[in-house]
Amino acid sequence: HNHAIIFGQKKITYHTLDKLTDNIASGLINLGLKKSDKVAIFLDNCPEFVISYFAILKAGCVVVPINYMFKIEETKFIIENSDTVALITSRAYITSAEELRLRIDALKHIIVTGKIKNDSLIDFQTLEKNTSPNKASIKPEDLAVILYTSGTTGHPKGAMLSHYNLVSNAIDSSSAIKITPKDTFICILPLFH
């Protein structure tokens, strides 16, 4: 029962993380998302960021992490450029998310962490309750993530990483720093990096 995430007093085991990501992936598929659809994560560092990231991958969709400190026009550019169809965010960014949906035709779904009372938004916790075994068939060469540069010399540019790239990076990193099952890591950087 090793912990995958420790966030303040909240602790999530690897087993629980696997179940949560399966449920959210099923929820995304039940919303009508298809393999290779882009799903943006517009969140601060929180457990829901990690859960969303892996759930999006399990659904066969593509993760588009967005810097939550970006101005609305920068965020709009990334969502349009990546053809994002769904956005996962928190209550803190609902106003921006709703404005983006009004301005971007392709953005169909806004999923919000935390309790909400708005029928046009999807409650993240509702997705967590999906238990139907929906998972996409994923190949190593399938696109997994589009990471955008900060755009210091113009518009941000998207770097596309496959599932193979992600696994290769994890294996190489763990080998280089000799990770063991007893190791714990602290994340002090924003997760959108």
Image (tube, rainbow, N blue to C red):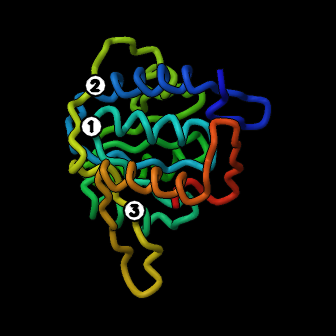
The correct choice, above or below, for 136 with respect to 162 in the image is above
In the image, what residue occupies the spot 51% across and 34% down? Answer: 51
Q: Secondary structure at mark 3?
A: strand
The correct choice, above or below, for 33 with respect to 155 in the image is above
Q: Is residue 97 left or right of residue 182?
A: left
Name of the residue lying farthest toward the top: 131
Task: Tell me, yes or no, whether the two marked residues, 1 and 3, touch with CB atoms within 8 Å.
Answer: no
Circle 3 Cα neighbour tier, 10 Å, few/some/many (<14 / 14–19 / ≥20): some
**Amino acid at circle 1:** Gly
Q: Nearer the viewer, residue 96 or 57?
A: 57
The part of the image, by quadrant, that contains residue 22 is top left
Task: Tell me, yes or no, whether the two marked residues, 2 and 1, touch with CB atoms within 8 Å.
Answer: yes
**Amino acid at circle 2:** Lys
Q: Secondary structure at mark 2?
A: loop
The image shows residue 130 at horizontal and vertical percentages of: 39, 15
Q: Is residue 2 left or right of residue 172?
A: right
Name of the residue lying farthest toward the right: 9
In the image, what residue occupies the spot 46% across and 37% down? Answer: 52
The image shows residue 77 at horizontal and vertical percentages of: 35, 67
Quadrant of the frame with the N terminus = top right
Q: Secondary structure at mark 1?
A: loop
The correct choice, above or below, for 94 with respect to 152 in the image is above
- Which residue is disc 2 drawn over? 135
Give the Cα separation between the discs numbered 2 and 1.
7 Å
The image shows residue 139 at horizontal and vertical percentages of: 21, 41
Q: Earlier in the sequence, mark 2 or mark 3?
A: 2
Residue 29 disc label: none
Q: Earlier in the sequence, mark 2 or mark 1?
A: 1
- Which residue is disc 3 drawn over? 147
Circle 2 Cα neighbour tier, 10 Å, few/some/many (<14 / 14–19 / ≥20): some
- Which residue is disc 1 drawn over? 60
Give the Cα separation between the discs numbered 2 and 3.
23 Å
